[in-house]
Amino acid sequence: MRLLLTLAALAAVPATAAAAGFPAANADTTATGATAPDSPYRYVALPGAGNTTQLVKILRTDGTAQRHRILPGALIVAPVTQDGATTGLSADGSTLVLGQPRRRFPEWVSRFVIVSGATLAPQRRLALRGDFALDGVSPDGQRLYLTRYASGDPLNYAVRVYDVAHRRLLARPLVDPRNPGEKMTGFPISRALSPDGRWAYTLYGGGEEQFVHALDLTGGRAYCVDLDGLSFDDVSAMHLRARTGRIDVLGAAGDPVRRIDAATFAVTKPRAQDVQQRAAAPADDGAPSDGFPWGLAAAVAAVGAGALVLLRRRYAADTDSAASRSASSSNPTVP
C-alpha cells in the first residue's frame, strides 16, 4: 500500500524533480524511462518518499508493472538529446544504468548506479571525479560511454569509456580515426539506435559543423558524419530515424532531408520520388510498439495498478529472470 500511495502522489511532482545533465537540462524522463529496440520492457525511475527512487519495470505493450524496487538516493534515467531521447538500458536487457540529477555545472563528482535489468537490484555504484554524463551502454552492459565536460565549458567535451569489469575509466577518449584531431562541438538534438541496438546515432548542431555522431556501442568506435549544406537552424528542427542499413535525417514534416549509409557513412540527398515511396512504406526497425499512452499521470496509474497485483502475489525480488537477447555481431565497414 505504501508503494501505491507514493505513486499516486507522483502526478503532482514538478518536472524539475527529474532534471538531468547538461545539455539536456530539465528534461523530465519520469514518463519516458529507458528501453532498447528489442526490449519488451521500459524502466521508469520516479521520485520516492524522502531521498529515494521508485524504479519500476513496465511491460511496453500494455503498461503493466512487472517489478518494482525502492533505491536509496535521487536517481534518474539519463536524457541524451534535446528532443527527450534517453539512454541507460543495454541491448540485451541485462543492465540498466541510472544517474544522479544535475545540481550544478560543472559537477565536481559524477555518480551512477548500475542495476540488474532482471531484478532491479543495484550491482555497482560509481563515483567519477569530474563532470560526466551518460551517453550509452554497450549491448552486454560491460562498457559505459560517457560524455566528459571539461573546464566548465559545455561545448568542450569528449566521449570516454568506462570498463565495468575492470572498474576503470579508459585513458583515451573516443575520436574519429579519420580525423583524430577534430573536436566535437555542438548540442545533441536527436538520437536513434540501430535496430540491433549496437549503434547509437546522435544529431549535433550549433558547432562549427552540423553532424551525426555514430557511436559503435559494441566495438568502441566513433565517427562524425558531416551534414554539408545544413545550418544549425535547419537541424534544430530535425530528428533521426535508424533503419536497417541506413540513418535518415528527417525534416519537420517527417521527410528525409539527408540519408546516411550505415556501412560507409556516405551522405546523400533523397530524391523526391524516393521520399514519396518511402513515406508509404512500413517501419522496419523491429522495435516493439508501445500501446500505452506515456503521459506522466497515465504512467503513474498503470504502475500503481500493476504494483497492486504484484504485491498481492508477494513476489520475491530474486525470482524474476530477464530473457536473454544477444547483440548483433554484424560489422559495418567504414571509410
Image (spheres, rainbow, N blue to C red):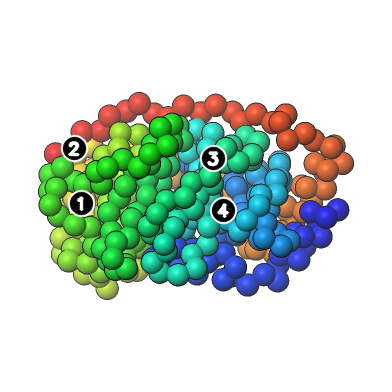
* Residue appearing at x 35%, y 34% in the figure: 218
Q: Is residue 165 left or right of residue 30?
A: left
Residue bearing the label numbered 2: 334
Q: Are marks 2 and 1 in contact (CB under 8 Å)?
A: no
Q: Which mark is residue 164?
A: none
Dot 4: element: loop
Q: Is residue 279 left or right of residue 28?
A: left
Chain-order first, disc 4 or disc 2? 4
- What residue is shown with label 1? 225
Corner quadrant of residue 255: bottom left
Label 1 crowd (10 A; few <14 / some 14-19 / many >=20): many
**For marks 4 and 3 on the same chain, the one whose residue lies earlier in the sequence:** 4
Residues 27 and 108: in front is 108
Give the residue drawn at x 85%, y 37%. Answer: 313
Quarter of the picture containing the C terminus is top left
Q: Marks 3 and 2, how far apart in space? A: 35 Å
Q: Nearer the viewer, residue 94 or 196?
A: 94
Does label 1 or label 3 sit earlier along the sequence? 3
Instruction: From the top left corner, tell me how far across and down residue 185 is, in percent.
Output: 23, 62
Q: CA distance from mark 1 to mark 3?
A: 35 Å
Can you identify the residue that label 3 sits on? 124
Are the residues tagged 1 and 4 within 8 Å (C-beta)?
A: no
Q: Nearer the viewer, residue 187 or 203?
A: 187
Q: Amino acid at mark 4?
A: Gly
Q: Amino acid at mark 3?
A: Arg
Badge 4 vs badge 3, beta-carbon distance below 8 Å: no
Disc nearer the start of the sequence (2/1):
1
What residue would you read off at disc 4?
A: 33
CA distance separating discs 2 and 1: 11 Å
Q: Is disc 1 placed on a helix, strand or loop? A: strand
Q: Are marks 3 and 2 in contact (CB under 8 Å)?
A: no
**Which amino acid, mark 1?**
Val
